[in-house]
Amino acid sequence: MDRLSKDNQKKLGNAIIFLAERCADLSKTKMLKLLYLIEERCALSYQMPFLGLSYKVWQAGPVADLVYDDICNEAPILKPYVHLFMKNNCIYIAPIKDFDEDEFSEIELKVMCEIAEEYGNRSAKELVKILHTPDSLWYQEAKANGLLESFRQGKRASSREIDFTKKMGPNDAAYYSELLSDLRASNHYGHV
């Protein structure tokens, strides 16, 4: 299970505030998909991790299980940043404080703006469909590990992790992997 340093907890909280302020009807599923798209864009376009969370191959697409579990457990990490409420039997997210851009680099802010603009008005179902296309890392990982049929039969989750380096050249993959390793170590040791 992932951990987040106190600094990255602030970063996660503010990233979700950013999404909640800019994206229509931010449900739990939509938020999880948008966070993944930010992480994927940072990794593939800039060879840098955003939060460094692991994204598992679940039936509805990639999921950061740390964030999913936090929301399902009344959001102890996210409670200072967002309010969760039920609407149409789904969990939705609303900010309870203003977005603090100081948590992010210029590149991260650029990526967050791009993802919000490109995908913010899409529904959760549309985002799931986009992330299920055959060229997606989710689909490739699910197919390679025999998960597509399991998902069709009702399985919801797997422990398989998306590996962004599969879409990178060797030098980019090595650089990204080093940054990811450093960030995950910082998250582990900076966790209180």
Image: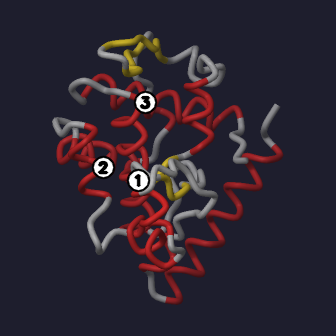
Give the camera-side residue of 81 and 148. 148
Give the camera-side residue of 95 and 145. 145
Q: Which residue is mark 3?
A: 16
Q: Which residue is mark 2?
A: 128
For this view, does 43 lie left or right of residue 126? right
Q: Where 165 sits versus 38, above or below?
A: below
Percent x, y for residue 38? 38, 50
Q: Within 10 angstroms of label 1, few (less than 14), some, or many (20 or more) residues?
A: many
Q: Which residue is mark 1?
A: 61
Percent x, y for residue 58? 49, 53
Q: In the image, what residue occupies the spot 18% across and 39% down?
A: 122
Q: Where 53 sits versus 165, above or below?
A: above
Cα–Cα gap, marks 1 and 3: 18 Å
Q: Within 10 angstroms of label 2, few (less than 14), some, or many (20 or more) residues?
A: some
Q: Earlier in the sequence, mark 1 or mark 3?
A: 3
Give the camera-side residue of 22 and 123. 123
Percent x, y for residue 159? 63, 58
Give the camera-side residue of 125 and 24. 125
- For the C terminus, give its image quadrant: top right
Residue lying furthest bottom: 170
Assess whether mark 1 and mark 2 are in contact (beta carbons under 8 angstroms).
yes
Query: In the rendered structure, which amino acid carries the disc numbered 1?
Result: Gly
**Quadrant of the rendered structure where residue 52 is?**
bottom right
Cα–Cα gap, marks 2 and 3: 18 Å
